[in-house]
Image: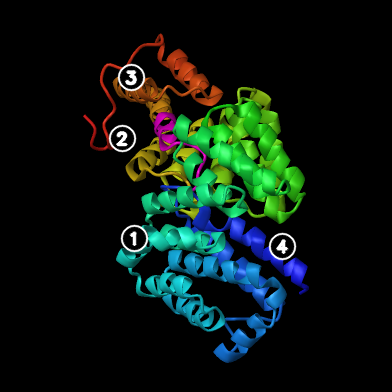
Amino acid sequence: MADLELVQRLEQTRAESGTIWGPPYQSSSLAESADEQYALAFRQSGMDVDALGLNDAVERITARRAIAAALLPAMDDWVAVRSVLRDKVAAHRLLDLLKAADADPWRQQVRDAIGRGDRRTLATLAKSPDLERQPAATLAFLCAALRSHGMFPAELEVLRRTQWKYPADFWTNLRLGTSLTWFKGSQDVNEGIGYLRAAMAVRPRSDQAAAMVGNGYYFLREFDQSIAWYRKAIEIRGTSAESSGWYSNLGITLGQAGQHQAAISAFEQSIKLKAGSVEAYCEFAMVLSNSQEARLRDPDRAAEMAERALELNPKAGGCWSALGVARYRQNQWQEARIALKKSLELGGLPAPPALRDEADFVIVDWLFLAMSSWKVGEPDEARRCYQQAVAVMESRKPTSHELLGLRAEAEALLGLAAQPASRPATASGNPMTDP
């Protein structure tokens, strides 16, 4: 593989790796994908670091001096990825290789700490006065190490110090902006969008940065802006397997904005380009179940999408939620209740990093439990579940067309007017234990 192509692939993988996603997310699925992409890129370039002997691998890497500035940071990030995956053997192999290929003493301290799983040393390095003298690439590696060990506050502090020193560094702005947007508070998100725009100013053709801006506007509920930025990310990346995730995010946002025909088209394209993610299948199922346009509803296909999601992650509550909704639309009300109760029992999002808040699924579960209970002749239980849904909605103030429409549907079925909750929802959200 030519040097330029290798650098481009490594840069893209580094941008997509699970080490950049903000708290509280640390996605093993993203890390697995990054691990595969790093291994493939090095293998196809004649540097199969997992198969070659140590000396041979070091010799081939150091011979590519012209691209050392891209190779070493990518390999350091690869170490962090393998730390997330807890693949100690593979991570240590990379560490041994990097120790021989790069003698920088400060980076070696970080690598040694990763190799030992030494959080205390990483915390010390994060506060070291020597931090100010390190190049941006070294600081990015420290941040990846902190991320891989779940040390989010320390990582954020280092990112802020790095951005102050290197305000035009793409990686610092991308990582800092991404982390801040995933906090989801409006002040953090607006600040994060600013850093992501700074990253875009450095690399206008970064689809990752564009998509992260889209995420930020999604969390601000500014769906028109979010949709525009996801479309920009797709335009930059082109119609390829790598843009499947952006199509999925676009579909989710279009669905939340009530543009269901466009959402279905986006999900179709996402799945066509690449086997869908858990979140894509769940959200596609929700749109097919709940579109306000009856002609777009397809409960049988919605159930199929939900079942695909469950095959990928049977322990994610959101997958059971999508199945329960689809079963309700199929008039299989008892089956719907079983799936919805399973969702509330398990809790959790379909797959991090997810755009939806967990509360969205809780609201959906309670509303459909209310409606399915009514359908099977249990009006008291139906009203209780409805009140649980309203309690969460009163506290969260959702604005999505979907949730507001579902509440209106439940009220019409139960013959209720919109009303405040009589009591707060329980912390567990578990219909098996709630009073």
The answer to whether marks 4 and 3 mark residues whose Cβ atoms lie closer than 8 Å is no
Distance Cα–Cα, label 1 vs label 3: 51 Å
Q: Which residue is mark 2?
A: 429
Q: Quadrant of residue 217?
A: top right
Distance Cα–Cα, label 3 vs label 2: 16 Å
Q: Quadrant of residue 17?
A: bottom right
**Observer able to see residue 203:** yes
- What secondary structure is found at the residue carrying circle 1? helix
The answer to whether marks 1 and 3 mark residues whose Cβ atoms lie closer than 8 Å is no
Residue 15 percent across, percent down from the top left: 60, 56
Q: Which residue is mark 3?
A: 383
Distance Cα–Cα, label 2 vs label 4: 46 Å
Distance Cα–Cα, label 4 vs label 3: 57 Å
- Give, as a three-letter code, the residue at label 1: Ala
- Give, as a three-letter code, the residue at label 2: Gly
Residue 268 percent across, percent down from the top left: 70, 43
Q: Which residue is mark 4?
A: 8
* Residue 357 covered by magenta stretch: yes
Mark 3 or mark 2: whose residue is earlier in sequence? 3
Distance Cα–Cα, label 2 vs label 1: 37 Å
Eye-nearest disc, 1 or 3: 1
The answer to whether marks 3 and 2 mark residues whose Cβ atoms lie closer than 8 Å is no
Eye-nearest disc, 3 or 2: 2
Mark 1 or mark 3: whose residue is earlier in sequence? 1
Residue shown at the point (58%, 67%) measured from the top left: 73
